[in-house]
Image: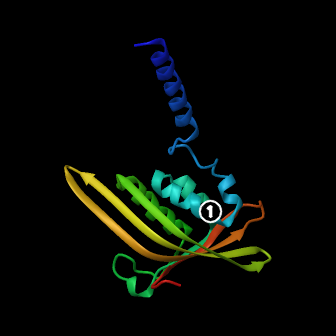
Amino acid sequence: MSRWGREMLVAVGILGGLAGCVFNPDKEPGDGQDLLRTPEGVVLQLADAYRKKDIDRYLACLVDTFEFHLVPRDVNDVWPAPTWGKVEEERFHRNMFERMDHIELTLTGDYASKIADEPETWRLYREFDLLLWETADELFERGVGYGWAEFVIQRQPDGRYGITDWFDLEQEP
């Protein structure tokens, strides 16, 4: 190989290494705290927590008085109550994050509306696509959830935002 060829190979290797550092998709999109500085950041951290199956990142998105509101038609033996709080939400997600081998949550949309000034409160609608994979003993199972969600996000006394309510919607808002 010529000297020029070796120099190009080294240059490409160095550029590739730098690009890996700068454009690493596994790198955190923030330190977690910075993402909670905006209502949109809360939703980004929520999706990231699902992907990484990180219960602490997930719970940081929720305020202590958080409530999940299920679509009434989905109340059944598995989901016996139409609403639940942060304790039940943590138990459910801890189980899901531990049991599933892979989770993908995609939230799309950009609707955000400020609905109160004091405390500052926002309503965000997002279309969601949730895929769950569990593989055990060569058995492959996949769960799917798709629909619309309304997030009510409120600024907390520490300046960070958190989800107060998550409404599962029957149709596009």
Instruction: Give the residue at x 49% y 16%.
Output: 4
According to the picture, the residue beneath numbered tag 1 turns out to be 42
Q: Residue furthest left?
A: 138
> Image check: 164 left or right of 171?
right
- Depicted 79 relative to depicted 104: above or below: below
Question: Where is residue 152 drawn, in percent x and y?
Answer: 63, 75
> Image check: 63 left or right of 6?
right
Identify the secondary structure beneath mark 1. helix
Q: Amino acid at mark 1?
A: Val
- Depicted 152 relative to depicted 19: above or below: below
Instruction: Give the residue at x 45% y 83%.
Output: 71
Instruction: Give the residue at x 45% y 81%.
Output: 81
Identify the image quadrant of residue 75: bottom left
Identify the image quadrant of residue 57: bottom right
Question: Where is residue 139 drawn, in percent x and y?
Answer: 20, 55
Quarter placement of the N terminus: top left
- Depicted 68 relative to depicted 93: above or below: below
> Image check: 124 left or right of 54?
right
